[in-house]
């Protein structure tokens, strides 16, 4: 799953997996990769380097360990004023001053630098080569259409694969490119929507897309429908629902704009995953009660799942890292209350600064190693027939 800068935690977990599997299991341990938001970028990086999993993780870690905000969005004074300050002005007095409507900004921040970074860090053609060589079976990333209200799973695989569709959920087979990743990682309001052509899918044409975690009813569904029998799920949210770690003390004061925005983003990024994990657990319990013939008739099978999520609240790490943001960005966030403990959730998505991302990588590595036995069993033991 995604979560902006929080996705650094995933890299720590991957680093732990790579360390545990070195000399134990060769090849790519994740033939099916699915991601949304910043998780889509991590998934695409692993897919492009699927021929050498350990090197792919090392390359991904080098990027996340050396991040600065300017690589993801305009963090200089001119850039922040052009987008963030203008957006705030539009909210406050734009209804009075006509010129703000004529030059209305499209987002709080300009993430054009991220396009340049993705071009530098990703060999996007490596995805197709990994498929052709057998190192990869499928890559799927999610994005949400502002134009139609549909959630779209963009996937790249050798064979046509019909994924479940409904009125608000479709799948599009395509060659995944940088624009798909930018669309999936376009945090609502914070980053601008990205136009994508989905020609041939229910009318097709160009639609504008935002973060893939929006309207994502079942994050694990694509992996299961591609044939996965085991799922390693890496979450990056508060883990009160996953059974561990302490939660932040509730605030008693009136919520700031940052607190409201952070709560809204947390709902977008994490609630669907929590619900999906619970549903998968229930489905596995049901399948266990069925005979093999009943399973075949119903088209059901057990899906083993291992969940790893932060053992401490990421907001606590974020509140101690805001000082590392560039001055213009820090001032913008402070103006809406993101520098306070109850508003730190919003900052936690935008803290693309090395001290913060390294802290999350270290946390992910520790959490992976704390589940060493479970991970080793997950990757080395055969599933029952």
Image (cartoon, helix red, strand yellow):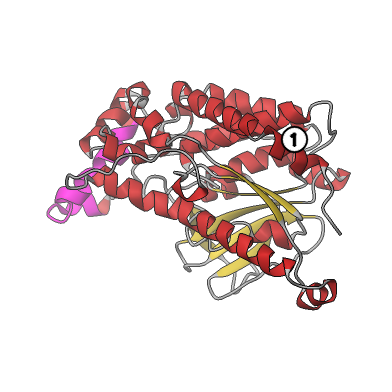
Q: Would residue 268 be found to the left or right of residue 177 on screen? A: left
Quarter-of-image position of residue 267 = bottom left
Quarter-of-image position of residue 247 = top left
Counting from the top left corner in percent of width and height, residue 348 is at: 40, 36
Q: Is label 1 in a helix, a strand or a loop?
A: loop
Number of other residues with Cα within 10 Å of mark 1, as a class: few under 14, some 14 to 19, many 20 or more:
many
Which quadrant holds the C terminus? Answer: bottom right
In the picture as drawn, the residue positioned furthest to the left comes out as 96
Q: Nearer the viewer, residue 323 or 170?
A: 323
Compared to residue 315, the image places residue 307 above or below, namely below
Query: Residue at label 1?
Result: 49
* Residue 106 can be seen in this image: no
Q: Would residue 358 be found to the left or right of residue 120 on screen? A: left
- Which SS type dominates the magenta stretch? helix
Q: Nearer the viewer, residue 163 or 287?
A: 287
Counting from the top left corner in percent of width and height, residue 369 is at: 64, 29
Identify the magenta region: 79-101
């Amino acid at each position: 799953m995604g979560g902006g800068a929080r996705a650094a935690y995933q890299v720590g977990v991957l680093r732990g997996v790579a360390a545990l599997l070195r000399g134990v299991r060769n090849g790519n341990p994740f033939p099916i990769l699915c991601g949304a938001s910043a998780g889509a970028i991590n998934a695409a990086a692993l897919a492009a380097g699927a021929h050498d999993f350990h090197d792919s993780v090392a390359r991904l870690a080098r990027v996340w360990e050396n991040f600065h905000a300017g690589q993801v969005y305009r963090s200089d004074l001119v850039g922040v004023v052009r987008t963030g300050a203008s957006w705030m002005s539009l909210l406050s007095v734009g209804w009075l001053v006509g010129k703000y409507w004529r030059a209305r900004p499209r987002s709080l921040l300009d993430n054009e630098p991220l396009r340049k970074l993705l071009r530098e860090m990703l060999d996007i053609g490596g995805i197709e080569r990994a498929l052709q060589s057998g190192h990869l079976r499928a890559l799927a990333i999610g994005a949400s259409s502002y134009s139609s209200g549909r959630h779209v799973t963009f996937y790249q695989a050798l064979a046509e694969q019909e994924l479940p569709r409904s009125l608000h959920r479709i799948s599009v087979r395509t060659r995944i490119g940088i624009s798909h990743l930018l669309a999936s990682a376009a945090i609502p309001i914070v980053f601008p929507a990205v136009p994508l052509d989905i020609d041939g899918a229910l009318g097709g044409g160009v639609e504008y897309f935002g973060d893939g975690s929006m309207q994502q009813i079942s994050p694990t569904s694509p992996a299961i429908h591609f044939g996965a029998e085991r799922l390693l799920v890496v979450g990056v949210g508060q883990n009160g629902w996953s059974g561990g770690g302490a939660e932040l003390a509730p605030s008693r004061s009136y919520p700031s704009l940052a607190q409201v925005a952070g709560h809204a983003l947390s709902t977008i990024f994490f609630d669907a995953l929590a619900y999906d994990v619970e549903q998968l657990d229930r489905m596995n319990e049901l399948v266990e009660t069925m005979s093999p013939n009943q399973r075949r008739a119903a088209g059901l099978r057990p899906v083993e799942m291992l969940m790893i999520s932060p053992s401490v609240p990421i907001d606590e790490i974020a509140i101690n890292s805001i000082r590392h943001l560039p001055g213009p960005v820090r001032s913008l966030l402070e103006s809406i209350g993101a520098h306070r403990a109850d508003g730190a959730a919003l900052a936690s998505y935008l803290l693309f600064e090395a001290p913060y991302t390294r802290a999350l990588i270290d946390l992910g590595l520790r959490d992976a190693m704390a589940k060493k036995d479970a991970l080793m069993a997950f990757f080395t033991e055969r599933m029952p027939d």
